Image (cartoon, helix red, strand yellow):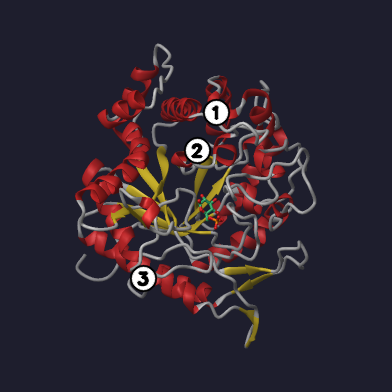
Amino acid sequence: MANKRFPEGFLWGGATAANQLEGAYNEGGKGLSVQDVTPKGGANVDGEVLITKEPTEDNLKLKGIDFYHRYKEDIALFAEMGFKVFRISIAWSRIFPKGDELEPNEEGLKFYDNLFDEMAKYGIEPLVTLSHYETPLHLAREYNGWTNRKLIEFFERYARTVFERYKDKVKYWLTFNEINSVLHAPFMSGGISTDGEVKPTKQELYQAVHNELVASALVTKVGHEINPDFKIGCMILSMPAYPMTSHPLDTLAAREFERENYLFADVHVRGKYPAYARRYFKENNINIEFAEDDEKLLAENPVDFVSFSYYVSVAAAHNPQDYQSGKGNLLGGLKNPYLEASEWGWQVDPVGLRIVLNDFYDRYQIPLFIVENGLGAKDVLVDGPNGPTVEDDYRIDYLRRHLEQVREAIKDGVEVMGYTSWGCIDLVSASTAQMSKRYGYIYVDRNDDGTGSLKRYKKKSFDWYKKVIASNGENL
Ligand code: BG6
């Protein structure tokens, strides 16, 4: 880069997920998803996730930010910021309400047709996640989610349906959001263990991992057959781990922490399980059941790019009990004494993003896409010259510092396709189901108790991001 501009065609935008913003949980023929029965969020709180029998009124996701009815207004705001791309997920249970039907729900398909058409009006490219923590509840309850190989068939039917339907409207696809999270948040991520009493075993969890990896390869194959121009990526929750000290065993602990995550990208890119995984499986008595064609399918259908979320880094040690644990995005790890943290204890580490980009690129040499990054903070609405606003300089600072590191990584030679910051419009948090954990450039008037007008207001970061995009990253 001769100057500070990002590469030509860089995809700037924002990211969301259906269950966190659409609302309308029981409209348009939609069936229930795992999110509709987890009113407190999907992360383990004291080892347990609250799972209710039926949807309960205190579950903010049921209404979300009512994007289902207000998407036109929201897309217009994204267009005003100059978005080139907008990441959404399709709610699987809008298309197949129970998950195991043979015929899709036309009303659900129509909703996304309308949404993509609206984006097309402004030249905004959709980036679509097929499965973002939204397994149909019926598949969780009847099949124990992704532990069951039957889900591969259901997922293929669903993916084929939406690929065929939107083949001329959508080019960029992601298979499973943060696929590695299934080991840590099995119900939210994989619809596993619905009664909350019996904890899934390692054997079950890694079988679920395998089933998802096979499903991911299968739909990558199907997608490329339907439209060879599709770009299909995997999506990994990235989290670099630093050795707590220079003790060699701490470095080993950090490597092991990272390998648990690399495993997922390794299979997606290289088409086979890495050697270290085989040792881990052996030592933990994990016997993954492979079907006859699995190896071939994995080998022949690598992804086109690797996408990832990045929020925090962690530290690792061989004697973790001697240190404080970090609070972060689902995966655990230790607190790093050199870093500050957000109000939710998520440690902020912009340089970690450059490290992640370099590590992935050194390992795979294929394009990378940062599809989530951002700061969850408690915003306060104040009066501004043009009406209510939020003076979110802290968010601008967070994003600027991260984008500076993306720029450095690009200078390092890393191929980065784009950047979609998380929750570009305020939405309901995945881990805690709060509205007050806000990430957006656009404030949505909704409170943790469910009250609020749902009106949208531009924050200070709205104009900042608009300027970033207009200058292609030159003016951060
Ligand atoms: C990622 C998820 O883990 O982090 C998103 O893909 C989520 O769905 C985001 O919202 C931020 O986490 P949280 O818990 O603050 O919403």
Instruction: Answer above or below: position of 68 versus 260.
Output: below
Q: Are marks 1 and 2 in contact (CB under 8 Å)?
A: yes
Q: Is mark 3 within 8 Å of ligand 1?
A: no
- Residue at figure coordinates x 40%, y 11% from the top left: 292
Kind of residue indicated by mark 2: Val
Image coordinates for residue 304, horizontal then vertical, percent: 34, 38
Front residue of this view, candidates 155 and 463? 155
Give me the disc on residue 146: 1
- Placement of the C terminus among the 4 image quadrants: bottom left
Image coordinates for residue 266, horizontal then vertical, percent: 31, 35
Which residue bears the numbered disc 3? 401
Front residue of this view, candidates 436 and 153? 436
Which residue bears the numbered disc 2? 182
- Residue at figure coordinates x 42%, y 67% from the top left: 469
Image coordinates for residue 320, horizontal then vertical, percent: 37, 51
Instruction: Answer above or below: position of 69 versus 91.
Output: below
- In the image, which is nearer the foreground, mark 1 or mark 3? 1
Gap in Å between the C-alphas at discs 2 and 3?
Answer: 30 Å
Along the horizontal axis of the image, is 227 left or right of 8? right
Image coordinates for residue 306, horizontal then vertical, percent: 36, 43
Q: Find residue 300 and report its image quarter.
A: top left
Front residue of this view, candidates 41 and 243? 243
- Placement of the N terminus among the 4 image quadrants: bottom left
Kind of residue indicated by mark 1: Trp
Q: Is mark 2 within 8 Å of ligand 1?
A: no
Mark 2 is surrounded, within 10 Å at the Cα level, by few (under 14), some (14 to 19) or many (20 or more) other residues, namely many
